[in-house]
């Protein structure tokens, strides 16, 4: 849900991995907000501690500790930013009794179902979860070609192929990214995440792969929006991938100027596409 700037000047940050939590924290503090972060051991960048007013470290699954941290700091609105590697569910998760009770209420362990139930649990304690772009301007990908190179006619054919497939894997809550070469799907994102899917698909395609990433049809804007950044381009460059196509208006672009600069330096085309928009 959308939200106004908190009346008490405090915002909570449930931080996963990557730079998105850091970028958010910097912007929130520029807006004059006191930022309390709850960070996850083995996931959240330690650097985040230097960008927030207060930080609490928890293990994945310590839901009661998360809620208490926000309540102690007077937080009534919060955002969920950054991912949690799905592989860590099998190794580092340490659910407390509250998390176990939440899990027992779930019929299926799909990402969105889990996150919605966590959000509902926080809201029962008076903590509203805001959309993940709360307080951020100009961070979503624009429609059109963002780089100096446009995709070729052949690459647009691969984008169209990947666009439809990405919608279906999103609908099934498998992932958000596919890698295509000559209208053949060479990789589908699963628990390894986007970077892992790009690496695997790029190695199979040899070179010239097209990477497509988009929202799930049932996407909840409070969490898990697709995100790209300079590292995405670094991974693509390492396997000589050629195109990155993402959903305009619903994909977060971190460090956009650097991303475009790296893409141009490596001859990679980056395009933002509106759902049901005209391609190529």
Image (cartoon, rainbow, N blue to C red):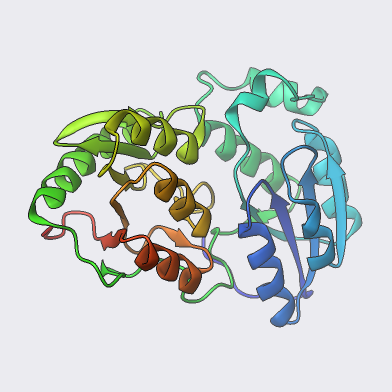
Which residue is at a point 72% across and 22% down the rendered structure image?
A: 101
- Check the picture and name the quadrant holding the C terminus: bottom left
Measured as percent of width and height from the top left, residue 209 is found at 27, 42
Task: Name the residue nearer the viewer: 56 or 64.
Answer: 56
Task: Name the residue nearer the viewer: 76 or 193.
Answer: 193
Relative height, residue 128 to residue 84 (above, below): below
| Residue 137 as seen in the image, left or right of residue 248 | right
Measured as percent of width and height from the top left, residue 155 is found at 16, 50
- Looking at the image, the residue that sits furthest to the right is 72
Q: Quadrant of residue 270?
A: bottom left
Measured as percent of width and height from the top left, residue 117 is found at 60, 35
Q: Quadrant of residue 186?
A: top left
Task: Name the residue nearer the viewer: 108 or 83.
Answer: 83
Relative height, residue 170 to residue 70 (above, below): above
| Residue 65 as seen in the image, left or right of residue 124 | right
Q: How many marks?
A: 0
Could you tell me if residue 6 is visible in this image? no
Which residue is at a point 31% across and 61% down the rendered structure image?
A: 267
Which residue is at a point 59% across and 73% down the rendered structure image?
A: 135
| Residue 185 as seen in the image, left or right of residue 265 | left
Measured as percent of width and height from the top left, residue 20 is found at 61, 58
């Amino acid at each position: 849900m959308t939200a106004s700037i908190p009346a008490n000047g405090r915002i909570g940050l449930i931080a996963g991995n990557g730079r998105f939590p850091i970028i958010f924290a910097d912007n929130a503090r520029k807006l004059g907000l006191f930022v309390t972060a709850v960070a996850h051991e083995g996931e959240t960048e330690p650097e985040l501690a230097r960008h927030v007013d207060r930080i609490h470290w928890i293990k994945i699954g310590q839901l009661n500790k998360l809620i208490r941290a926000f309540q102690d700091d007077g937080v009534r609105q919060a955002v969920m930013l950054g991912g949690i590697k799905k592989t860590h569910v099998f190794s580092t998760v340490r659910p407390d009794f509250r998390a176990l009770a939440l899990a027992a209420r779930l019929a299926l362990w799909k990402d969105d179902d889990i996150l919605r139930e966590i959000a509902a649990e926080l809201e029962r304690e008076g903590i509203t979860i805001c959309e993940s772009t709360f307080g951020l301007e100009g961070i979503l990908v624009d429609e059109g070609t963002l780089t100096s190179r446009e995709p070729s006619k052949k690459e647009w054919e691969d984008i169209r192929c990947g666009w439809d497939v990405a919608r279906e894997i999103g609908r099934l809550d498998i992932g958000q990214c596919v890698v295509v070469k000559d209208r053949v799907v060479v990789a589908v994102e699963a628990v390894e995440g986007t970077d892992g899917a790009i690496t695997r698909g790029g190695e199979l395609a040899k070179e010239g792969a097209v990477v497509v990433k988009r929202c799930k049809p049932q996407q909840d804007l409070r969490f898990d929006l697709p995100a790209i950044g300079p590292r995405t381009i670094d991974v693509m460059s390492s396997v000589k991938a050629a195109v990155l196509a993402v959903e305009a208006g619903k994909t977060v672009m971190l460090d956009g100027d650097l991303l475009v600069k790296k893409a141009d330096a490596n001859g990679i085309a980056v395009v933002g596409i509106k759902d049901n928009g005209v391609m190529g």
